[in-house]
């Protein structure tokens, strides 16, 4: 069992959704986990920006500039979907 599955005061077993201890009536304190999605979103956007920068730099040197910008948009779109899925 996890720490939060027992009362801090009397040690009685707690149900996952209980707000009070069934034995002593002490209020149950639950630790909220911080969401990981802001870190995932930031990493995905930094990677996407780096990829787009490289593709744009290559495109500026060649005749396939429109294709490179399309590829950059596609990469950002895919990475955005990944970040969106990670946040749910």
Image (cartoon, rainbow, N blue to C red):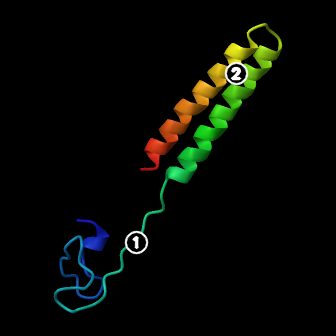
Q: Depth-wise, is mark 2 or mark 1 nearer the camera?
A: 2
Q: Is residue 17 left or right of residue 81?
A: left
Residue for point 55% across, 38% down:
80
> Could you tell me residue 49's position as x and y percent?
69, 34
Instruction: Tell me the SS state at disc 2.
Output: helix
Name the quadrant of the N terminus: bottom left
Give the quarter of the image for residue 62.
Answer: top right
The 10 Å Cα crowd at callout 2, few under 14, some 14 to 19, many 20 or more, is some
Mark 1, secondary structure of its residue: loop
- Choose top left, top right, bottom left or bottom right for residue 51: top right
Comes first in the chain, label 2 or label 1: 1
Q: Which mark is residue 69?
A: 2
In the drawing, does residue 85 fall left or right of residue 49? Answer: left
Residue at x-position 40% and y-position 71%: 31
What residue appears at the point 72 percent right and 16 percent down from the top-left corner?
66
Residue 6: x %, y % from top left: 24, 76
Q: Is residue 18 above or below residue 77?
A: below
Question: Do the CB atoms of the residues marked 2 and 1 lie less than 8 Å apart?
Answer: no
Please report the residue visible at 63 percent of the width from the left and 40 percent of the height from the top: 45
The residue tagged 1 is: 31
Q: Which mark is residue 60?
A: none
- Position above or below: 24 against 34: below
| Rendered location of residue 23, percent (x, y) | 16, 89
């Amino acid at each position: 069992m996890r720490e939060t599955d027992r009362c801090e005061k009397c040690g009685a077993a707690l149900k996952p959704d209980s707000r009070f201890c069934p034995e002593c009536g002490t209020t149950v304190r639950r630790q909220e986990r911080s969401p990981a999605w802001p870190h995932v979103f930031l990493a995905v956007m930094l990677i996407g920006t780096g990829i787009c920068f490289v593709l744009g730099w290559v495109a500026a040197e060649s005749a396939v500039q429109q294709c490179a910008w399309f590829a950059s948009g596609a990469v950002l779109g895919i990475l955005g979907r990944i970040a969106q899925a990670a946040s749910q």
